[in-house]
Amino acid sequence: MRTLSLILLGAVLWFLAAVFIRLALPWGVFSGGYATAILFGLTALLAPVLLSSVHRLTAGGQTPRLPTAAIICLVGVLLDAVAMTWSPELYASNPARLVNGAAWLLFGVGALLTSAMLQDRPR
């Protein structure tokens, strides 16, 4: 049951990220300037919080966090691949503008997985 919850949460988080990209593109958030750098920094800072919240919400208890991160990231990456291939307009009206948004998505996946590895390390 926990795995199904993680899959559903992964899909919800993916959709929220896709909507964020679509709404943020016109504001220049993904233009590669300071706003993009700030967004990447915030993503790195918020990834551990998001991971801990999802882990707690799905009753992960004392189990390692890496499987939690892996499942939600797996769902997101698979949905991104499908959407970017067959429905890029979900992210942007002009798919050519999507590159920095896609880079942010990949960075978010890496930030979540890194957070899990750091939280799971022996103390």
Image (cartoon, rainbow, N blue to C red):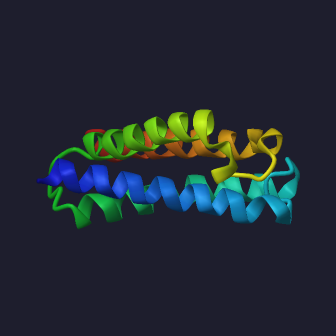
Q: Residue 44: x and y, percent?
A: 58, 52
Q: Residue furthest left?
A: 1
Whether residue 123 is visible, yes or no, is: no
Total marks shown come to 0
Q: Residue 1: x and y, percent?
A: 11, 53
Query: Between 98 and 34, which is closer to the camera in this rendering?
Result: 98
Please give left or right for residue 114 compared with residue 116 in the image.
Answer: right
Residue found at x 59% / y 36%: 86
Query: Between 11 and 47, which is closer to the camera in this rendering?
Result: 11
Q: Residue 4: x and y, percent?
A: 20, 51
Q: Residue furthest front?
A: 86
Please give left or right for residue 12 compared with residue 100 in the image.
Answer: left
Q: Is residue 37 above or below residue 75?
A: below
Residue found at x 22% / y 44%: 64
Residue found at x 68% / y 39%: 103
Q: Is residue 116 above or below residue 23?
A: above
For the C terminus, which image quadrant? top left
Q: Is residue 8 above or below residue 103?
A: below
Q: Residue 56: x and y, percent?
A: 24, 64
Please give left or right for residue 60 compared with residue 23 in the image.
Answer: left
Query: Between 82 and 110, which is closer to the camera in this rendering?
Result: 82
**Which of the 4 image quadrants contains residue 24?**
bottom right
Whether residue 115 is visible, yes or no, is: yes
